[in-house]
Image (cartoon, rainbow, N blue to C red):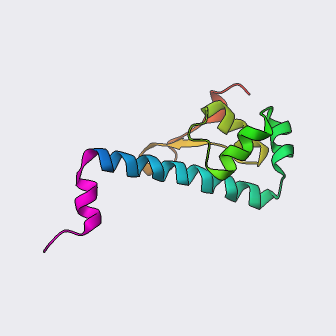
């Protein structure tokens, strides 16, 4: 059976890396939008609560901000009532809560 155009494209390691990076950026943008929609908080209020400029928060919301410091993402998550956890291999009981290691 012949390969699809996508399969051929993704076989190239550079293309695969590009797609994975863009997908991660999309996930971050969607996560931020979901958190904001859930709580219905304005960009300026979020910025004030977490100590970041409204421009940075707006850039995250629109997806223009490509990278974010983990400490800043943790502060933003907290402002929406979320906590970041690391789960080892999807096993129950194997969680590390970021709050235990990051000073806010």
Compared with 1, 29 (above or below) is above
Q: Residue farthest to the left?
A: 1
| Prevailing SS of the magenta stretch | helix
The magenta segment: 1-13
Q: Is residue 87 left or right of residue 45?
A: left
For residue 33, which quarter of the picture? bottom right
Q: Residue at x 85, y 44 (%)?
A: 44
Compared with 103, 24 (above or below) is below
Viewer-nearest residue: 3 or 89: 3
User: Residue 89 magenta-drawn?
Assistant: no
Q: Is residue 74 left or right of residue 6?
A: right
Q: Is residue 2 left or right of residue 23?
A: left
Viewer-nearest residue: 67 or 84: 67
Q: Is residue 18 left or right of residue 42?
A: left
Residue 6 placed where, x, y %? 29, 64
Q: Residue at x 86, y 37 (%)?
A: 48
Q: Is residue 91 visible?
A: no
Residue 88 placed where, x, y %? 45, 43
Compared with 104, 19 (above or below) is below
Counting the numbered discs, the total is 0
Q: Is residue 74 visible?
A: yes
Query: Dividing the image into 4 quarters, which one contains the C terminus?
Result: top right
Q: Residue at x 58, y 42 (%)?
A: 85
Q: Residue farthest to the top?
A: 103
Query: Dividing the image into 4 quarters, which one contains the N terminus?
Result: bottom left
Q: Residue at x 39, y 52 (%)?
A: 19
Q: Residue farthest to the bottom?
A: 1
Residue 83 placed where, x, y %? 67, 44
């Amino acid at each position: 059976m012949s390969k699809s155009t996508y399969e051929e494209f993704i076989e190239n390691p550079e293309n695969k890396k590009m797609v994975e990076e863009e997908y991660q950026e999309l996930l971050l943008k969607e996560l931020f939008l979901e958190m904001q929609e859930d709580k219905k908080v304005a960009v300026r209020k979020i910025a004030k609560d977490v100590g970041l400029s409204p421009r940075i928060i707006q850039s995250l919301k629109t997806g223009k901000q490509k990278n974010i410091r983990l400490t800043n993402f943790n502060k933003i998550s907290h402002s929406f009532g979320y906590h970041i956890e690391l789960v080892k291999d999807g096993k129950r009981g194997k969680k590390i809560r970021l709050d235990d290691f990051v000073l806010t």
